[in-house]
Image (cartoon, helix red, strand yellow):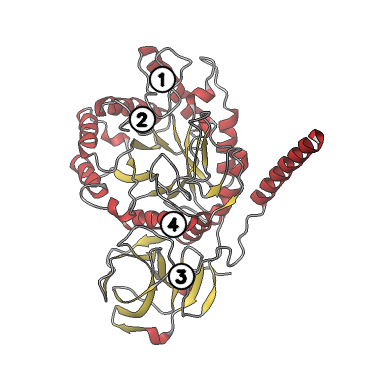
Amino acid sequence: MGQFFIFTRVFCALFLLLSVNLSAQFIDTSPDRVKTPLSVKYKKLGTLKPRSTREIESSRITVGCETLDRGHTVWDNYKAYLPALGVKKIRLQAGWAKCEKVPGVYDWKWLDEVIDYAVANDIEPWLQPSYGNPAYPGGGGINLLNSMMTSPEGYAAWDRWVEALVTRYKDRVKEWEIWNEPDHPGQKITPETTAALNIRTASIIKRIQPEAKIAGLAFASNSNMEYLDAFLKFIAEQGKLDLFQWISYHSYTMRPEDAYTEKRVLGLRKVIEKYSKNILLRQGENGAPSTYIPSFALDKYYWTEYTQAKYDLRRLLGDLGHDIETSVFTIIDIYYNWGPPNAVLNTKGLIQSDVTMAAIRPKVAYYAVQNLASIFDNNLVLNPGVTYTSTGNASLSVFGYQHKTSKKPLVTLWLDGKEVNNSFQTTPVDITLENVTFKDPVWVDLMSGQVYAIPKSDWSKSGNSYRFKSIALYDSPVLIAEKSLLKLQ
């Protein structure tokens, strides 16, 4: 009986590994791969055709591949899902302590595999040298909290690490970030200490790679204006603002649109503009779970795969609509394997995982982001001249875009008045769009990728005004787009 039990467990484990490997190679990109109970009166034309990273020249969208350096995810388990997703950038911690376990000896094997695979698939990695390295006295630790260097020896080793890292990858990595969430409330790092480390590190990067683009801060907050102001003031006083392309921040709010206020993200932008007209905002980490989680950002809420997908879409398009480069956290569920009772699975991944860190299957959010990535590349640019009026009292998010050469239009729309929920009930809204030019507008549900014709009886033109009657809207983004902008299957 015991032998049978062991055989059964081994067989099941082998079957799981085989199915994981097969799923990574044969990602379902067929029409109707996401089923939703959304009911639309229009005639269906088809489904958005996904585009791989090799088919997209560039975009402003990143997907997080964090925590590889600490062994909370496994690169080989999910890497095959990245090219099919169509997101052009990945964010990584380079893992000083993983690369330099013995002082002065760098083992690049694991990081080479990640960087080389990404570059071979036309994916642009941006690297963060943090965290610290306990191999050195005062070298810091390997996790988020209290891991910064505390001794001259630790800082000197950090300098050598950054120099070795940039020298090795300068031909493949063009974008960098310095240290993750130094302002986290669980830490006691002053903005001046963070600014000094940012200057120190960015100066090394620029000396070796003058064309490098660097994100400063990696701000845990989206509202701590005082910390940001002190950080930038220190850098400005040193005359080093030109080292930085962006200030990156992480922005978790239960209703995504609550971030875009003067007390949060728009306020951060004002603080930056006080010191520089050239430094941009970059959203570097944000995403929703797909289940209840007891800790981490957006915890203690009964998330589902549908609410996760809605949240991720609203956040990504909210950022792009405010002209902010954006990121979705994260590619796969992260297993913080700290041992009982502290081990926990953070289910913010676009791919479902478990305590084995296997890639089980893509979630609804994977396909939703894949749909978005297939359209929102760098050929599609914001058209801030687009304005709208609508019937009813529903609160809307509406952003206009156009193809940068053909000028063909696309507009994103969703009901933004409430937090995401599991309902697919739509609300008919009459909406008039100004300063656009449609010839054959279609309606697109980004979650499912389904594309529908808008009957001629439901829209009319008057000059540069287009009135759409009873357009179906819900709490997940839809598009009104010129049909020829889209590739269907």
- Label 1 amino acid? Gly
Q: Is residue 338 rendered to the left or right of residue 478?
A: right
Residue wearing tag 1 = 140
* Residue 311 sits in quarter: bottom left
Contact (CB < 8 A) between labels 2 and 1? Answer: no
Q: Nearer the viewer, residue 277 or 101?
A: 101
Q: Nearer the viewer, mark 4 or mark 2?
A: 4
Labels 2, 3: front one: 3
Residue 489 appears anywhere in the view: yes
Left or right of 259: which side holds 43?
A: right
Check disc 2 and report its element: helix, strand or loop: helix
Q: Earlier in the sequence, mark 4 or mark 2?
A: 2
Q: First in sequence, mark 1 or 4: give its number.
A: 1
The Cα atoms of the two marked residues, 2 and 1, are separated by 19 Å
Question: Tag 3's secondary structure?
Answer: strand
Which residue in the structure is indicated by mark 2?
Answer: 202
Amino acid at pointer 2 = Ala
User: Residue at point 69% right, 42% down?
Assistant: 17
Secondary structure category for the residue under label 1? loop
Q: Counting other residues with Cα less than 10 Å from the Cα at mark 3, is it few (<14), some (14-19), or many (20 or more)?
A: many
Say whether disc 3 or disc 4 marks the residue closer to the N-terminus: 4
Residue topped by disc 4: 307
Q: Residues within 10 Å of mark 1 (few under 14, many from 20)?
A: many
The mark closer to the camera, 1 or 4, is 4
- Give the residue at mark 3: 444
> Of helix, strand and loop, which one carries label 4?
helix
